[in-house]
Amino acid sequence: EVFTQLKQIQQKGLDELQTVRDEASLQAWRTAHLGRSSAVMQVFSGLGGLDKELRPQVGQQANLVKQALEGAFAERESAVKTAALQQSLASEKLDVSLPGRRRPQGRLHPATQALNEICQVFVEMGFQIYRSPEVETDVLNFELLNIPAHHPARDMWDTFHTTTPGILLRTHTSPGQIRLMREAAPAPIRAILPGMCYRYEQTDASHESQFNQIELLAVGKGITFGDLKGTLDEFAVRMFGEGVRTRLRPSYFPFTEPSAELDVQCFLCMGKGCNVCKGTGWLELGGCGMVHPVVLQNGGYDPEVYSGFAAGLGPERVAMMRYRIEDIRSFWANDLRFLEQF
Ligand code: PHE
């Protein structure tokens, strides 16, 4: 009779386990069928009241039932856990075994790279970086640079004017010379002024309506044209390599006297002549000269005591030569096929 009872306990337990589908009912089942007050445990605690001969057999049988229930529970438990995982994978659509997605990586614009490199060289030579605004006044962009209204020299810079009279987009970084001098006077200056300039020009392969310039300015006592030439030569060597020389050709700017165009020896053929320098052996880099006495005065320096030199370099030209970019309009056309090459 005890044996029939044990069989029934086992059967009932296994039957009820079939309906268990989740963690909560698993635990409830365990308490009911394997807990302290479960039927099988009561058989164990009732063993003492049985006949001596019967005890080992009943005990053994009860153990088998308990083991069967425990085994079935373990199996069911893992089945429920697997089902729960499947369910969450299906509903949350998160596969943690998938490889990560790569973020597209940006890079610096080729013009910015050239700009940074030139700045770096001058910073190493002891020049400080000075920032001045891209939206400028007519007074600073022209007048104080010795270019009066209606003077024919204004034709050298086709200008974007704004609807506010006297406010324009700077055509060069030179107005920053005045700003810096007025801040620094009478202290000596050794600085570069990098940034974007704008010109209202018919664009073609070598003309664009916006481009970077790096203005160079040194003001102090006893600064000579030799210092300008020496500084540019040192720059050329540090920037383009040992043995690269510079050449100055006479020119005209209203804010420098004397003025010159700056050429640097072609760093590809070292002056022999190739298709990048169009057979001349030289590459044009910008304008330069000794700061005009009127400009020194406008900046707050006495031209009888102080002198200085200035230059304006074009970083896009460096990038064009270096990468053999044939059309300057590629820089700001925003074509990723072009930009991703650098
Ligand atoms: N500002 C001149 C230009 O843009 C370049 C220049 C700068 C020339 C400094 C001389 C001295 O054409």
Image (cartoon, rainbow, N blue to C red):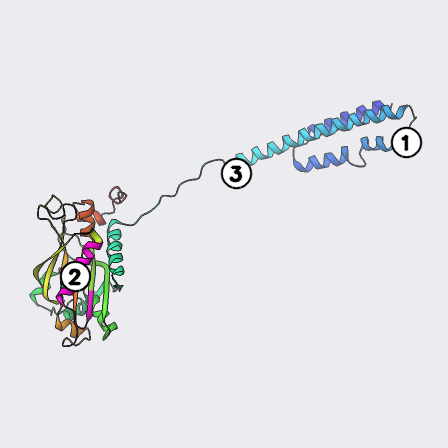
Whether the residue carrying mark 1 lies under 8 Å from ligand 1 is answered with no
First-in-chain label (3 vs 2): 3
Pick whichever, 117 or 68, lies toward us.
117
Name the residue located 84 percent from the left edge and 27 percent from the top edge: 59
The image quadrant that residue 136 belongs to is: bottom left
Label 1 crowd bin: few (<14), some (14–19), many (20+), radius 10 Å: few
Amino acid type at image mark 2: Gly
Q: Secondary structure at mark 1?
A: helix
The boundaries of the magenta stretch are 217-238
Q: Which residue is mark 1?
A: 48
Give yes or no for contact between labels 3 and 1 (Cβ–Cβ under 8 Å): no
Q: Nearer the viewer, mark 2 or mark 1?
A: 2
Number of numbered tags placed on the structure image:
3
Q: Is 235 one of the magenta-colored residues? A: yes
Name the residue located 20 percent from the left edge and 47 percent from the top edge: 322
Locate the N terminus and report the quarter of the image it occupies.
top right
Label disc, if present, on residue 328 of the rendered structure: none
Q: For this view, does 96 lie left or right of residue 82?
A: left
Name the residue located 91 percent from the left edge and 28 percent from the top edge: 50
Q: Which residue is mark 3?
A: 92
Residue 168 in sight in this render: no
Per the model, the C-alpha gap separating discs 3 and 2 is 69 Å
